[in-house]
Amino acid sequence: MEVAGREYRYLATSARHRDRALVRNGVEIRIRRHGSGARKKAAFTVLGLADATDLVLAAVLCGVNTRNLTRGGAVRAFFGRSLQWLDVFQ
């Protein structure tokens, strides 16, 4: 993705997608999520010279559902929403 004229990649770094990384040229912000429910927490590790834009973008992406950013995730989300929509008419 491109934000503020910079190219970023946001990718899963673990098999269960709990660990992620936001990467741009010379900067990597690693995000480790743990906990469940109200006790969810995230730990950030910054490698390189990150600025406020990098940190805010990492925090936002950590807090939102990014499944729709992938092709497979978008298809799953579409079918899930379609089935919820059909429940309205029953």
Image: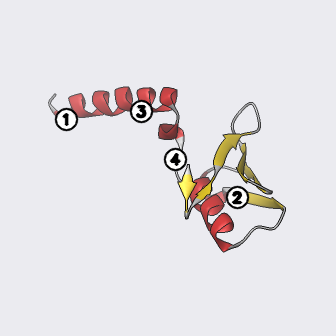
Camera-side residue: 74 or 63? 74
- Dot 1: within a 10 Å radius of its alpha carbon, few (fewer than 14), some, or many (20 or more) residues? few
Label 2 to label 4, Cα distance in Å?
A: 15 Å
Look at mark 4 in the image and give the residue it sits on. Answer: 65
Label 1 to label 3, Cα distance in Å?
A: 17 Å
Q: Classify the position of the C terminus by image quarter.
A: top left
**Residue for point 75% across, 30% down:** 15
Find residue 41 and name its label: 2
Instruction: Give residue 29's quadrant in the image.
Output: bottom right
Camera-side residue: 84 or 4? 4
In the rendered image, residue 71, in percent from the top left (x then y), is placed at 49, 29
Q: Amino acid at mark 3?
A: Ala
Q: Look at the numbered disc 3 and give the secondary structure of its residue.
A: helix
Q: Earlier in the sequence, mark 4 or mark 1?
A: 4
- Asked if labels 3 and 1 touch by Cβ distance under 8 angstroms, the answer is no
- Dot 4: within a 10 Å radius of its alpha carbon, few (fewer than 14), some, or many (20 or more) residues? few
Look at mark 1 in the image and give the residue it sits on. Answer: 88
